[in-house]
Structures are given as structure tokens and as C-alpha cells.
Amino acid sequence: MFKKPFIVIAVLCIITIAAYSDDDWHKFTLWIDKNHIGLKADFYGKEGSDKCYNLPYYINDEATSINTRGGCVALYQHANCHGRRVIFKMDCSSDRCCPHNNFVACGFNDEASSYEMC
């Protein structure tokens, strides 16, 4: 009836969908230009997990704006969540926070290499 590879792929797809459907997962978007213009990429992270995610090559050191979709995202200057850390969240008044629409304003343009949810 079904071949084994098909069943394995179907099960993996279901597991992936279930993982991303969990309420703890949060989506955000990075753009390579200010004001949410230009090429963009969506990313996910599990809130409250302190898990670090490295950005893929096509957006590494290229991001200039972000939409956190109401969540909190910490971007790091280097891979594996090392280097300078900048927080992005709505209504943040801390000097560690940066405007969502233009990373130039906080000296973090084209510097993000990894992230974690905060």
C-alpha cells in the first residue's frame, strides 16, 4: 500500500506541524532594508527556552528591520548568541532596545548573526 519512505516523511511532517502549532513557538520576520522593505525571512523560536538559533547565510549580517509580532527577540552580533545583544520588543524603553524599523538607529545594522526568544 504505502512505501516505508512515504510513511516516514508523513510522520515527520505531522511532528513538525505539531511542534510549530504549539503556543510556545513564536514567529518573527527580518528584512534586509529599513522600514520593513526588501528581501525578508521568517523565523521561529520557542519562548522561554533560552535556546540559541544561528541565522542562515542569506540573512546573516544583513538584517536592518524586524517585526517581532508582539514577541520579544534578542539578536546577537555573533553566532551561537555571542557578542553584542540587542533586544527587540514592543514598548521597550531600555537602552538595550532598538527600533523595529531601522537597526541603524542603535548601531546594529547588518550585524545580527544569531537570536533567541526573550
Image (cartoon, rainbow, N blue to C red):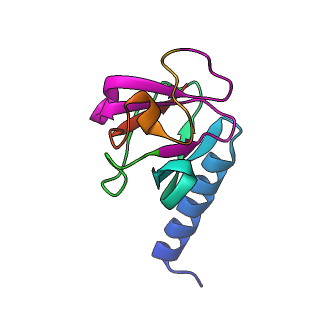
Residue 93 drawn above or below residue 31: above
Q: Find the magenta span and give its range.
A: 65-94
- Residue at the outermost front position: 105
The residue lying at 55 percent from left, 33 percent from top is 99
Residue 36 drawn above or below residue 103: below
Q: Position of residue 5 (x, y in %)?
A: 46, 74
Q: Position of residue 71 (x, y in %)?
A: 65, 33
Residue 19 drawn above or below residue 80: below
Q: Is residue 94 left or right of residue 104?
A: right
Magenta residue check for 55:
no
**Quadrant for the N terminus in the image:** bottom right
Q: Is residue 78 left or right of residue 51?
A: left
The residue lying at 68 percent from left, 42 percent from top is 22
Instruction: Name the residue nearer the viewer: 65 or 72.
Output: 65
Q: Position of residue 110 (x, y in %)?
A: 34, 44
Q: Is residue 20 left or right of residue 49?
A: right
Magenta residue check for 66:
yes
Q: How many marks?
A: 0
The residue lying at 48 percent from left, 24 percent from top is 50
**Quadrant for the C terminus in the image:** top right
Residue 115 drawn above or below residue 92: below
